[in-house]
Amino acid sequence: MSNNRPKHAPVIQFPVRDNCLQIGGMSLMRLAQRVGRTPFYAYDRQRITERVASLRQHLPTEVHLHYAMKANPMPAIVQHMACLVDGIDVASGGEMRIALDTPMSPGMVSFAGPGKGDDELSCAIAAGIVLNMESEHEMERIARLGAHLGIRPHVAVRVNPDFELKSSGMKMGGGPKQFGVDAERVPAMLDRIGKLGLDFEGFHIFSGSQNLKVAAIQESHEKTLRLGVSLAQYAPAGVRLLNIGGGFGIPYFPGDEPLDLAAVGENLRRLMPEVKRQLPETRVVIELGRYLVAEAGIYVCRVLERKKSRGQVFLVTDGGLHHHLAASGNFGQVIRKNYPVVVGNKLDGNEREIVSVVGPLCTPLDLLADQMEMTKAEAGDLIVVFQSGAYGLTASPTAFLSHPAPVEVLV
């Protein structure tokens, strides 16, 4: 049986031996025995290490690399990442506490996001974390809290640019946004920062995410660096930090192809000399989350039964949208598309069929694969959802219908 729909780009980051997926140096079946139950998420530390090494190879040496922890805040991953990258970016008090438990210097941790509470701001000020300020009101609150604590807060301005990252999955800049301060209001804010005596670090300019278009990323880098240089003339002190965001995408869906990282890096090499000439004290940062961890992770669930309904085969599993909302198509997709999904312990089987993989929830939205061709599976086989290392468990409604939460392992 054949399926004429577009195919996924090959998932080649994990080896296959004896018809079974290998992750972390062991077979999927052995790993499932080690974990003890399904469903579970597994993340391969070597794949993460190799991805960071690839970025170091292709990006200019003067560009610093930060991990955007919201992509995957599992403490073991953050600990591992802290030994590989130059900084960590957090988006809540809970993430901040995990980051502070790592070897990363607090001064290399930054905190972004609208709606920070006074308790979160106070903890960040006391720890010496850089606060990416999202509004003038937040700036005034930080100044008051710093004065109360007797500590000079480290701050940067998150800028909402007047452009967006074209072709991005989520647009974080351009137009009215809840994120950051509109670029045209930043000069006045910088003047106020000087009067308040805050310890000014620089700028955070993030315009979009999940982008596979080299030209769009190159254009965004050029505009972002130009905006940072332009705003620097209004700064109350030398600009020490210019975080130009991330936006590097990974292939999830049929027709997607991997990002040409070499072309992105070559363009940055072309741009950096002029940036360093105009901002010699500035540390330029690229902040990545999904690109660092997504392809290193898998979600694994077990087939409970094969079910036929009016000629269609369903594989009913013990996993679903409550664990992996993104793979179900309910986390930002306008038109639902399948993640790469396979029978992990029967990767090279000759008998194939078109099936739908569903979970145990009482909703038709609980769908992990819709009419996909894969090896014929039976009860007990293991279904693997690739590209699951980012925005998986913590982006999912785990309390829905009160099923147990899955296990997470770093191997």
Image (tube, helix red, strand yellow):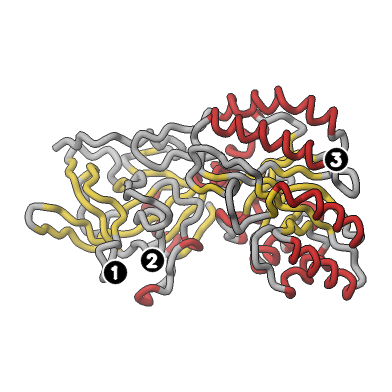
Compared to residue 9, the image places residue 409 above or below, namely below
Instruction: Identify the residue shown where x is 53% and y is 47%.
Output: 171
Image disc number at residue 187: none
Where does label 3 land, which residue? 233
Where does label 2 land, which residue? 322
Q: Earlier in the sequence, mark 1 or mark 2?
A: 2
Compared to residue 49, the image places residue 110 above or below, namely below
Q: Is residue 244 left or right of residue 125?
A: left
Query: Of circles 1 and 3, which is in front?
Result: 3
Image disc number at residue 361: 1
Query: Label 3 is placed on what type of residue?
Result: Gln
Q: Position of residue 344 (x, y in %)?
A: 33, 47
Q: Is residue 190 left or right of residue 41?
A: right
Tell me, yes or no, whether the two marked residues, 1 and 3, touch with CB atoms within 8 Å.
no
Which of the 4 image quadrants contains residue 279?
A: top right
How far apart are labels 1 and 2 at the CA level?
8 Å
Query: Label 2 is placed on what type of residue?
Result: His
Q: Position of residue 139 (x, y in %)?
A: 78, 63
Q: Secondary structure at mark 2?
A: loop
Tell me, yes or no, whether the two marked residues, 1 and 2, touch with CB atoms within 8 Å.
yes
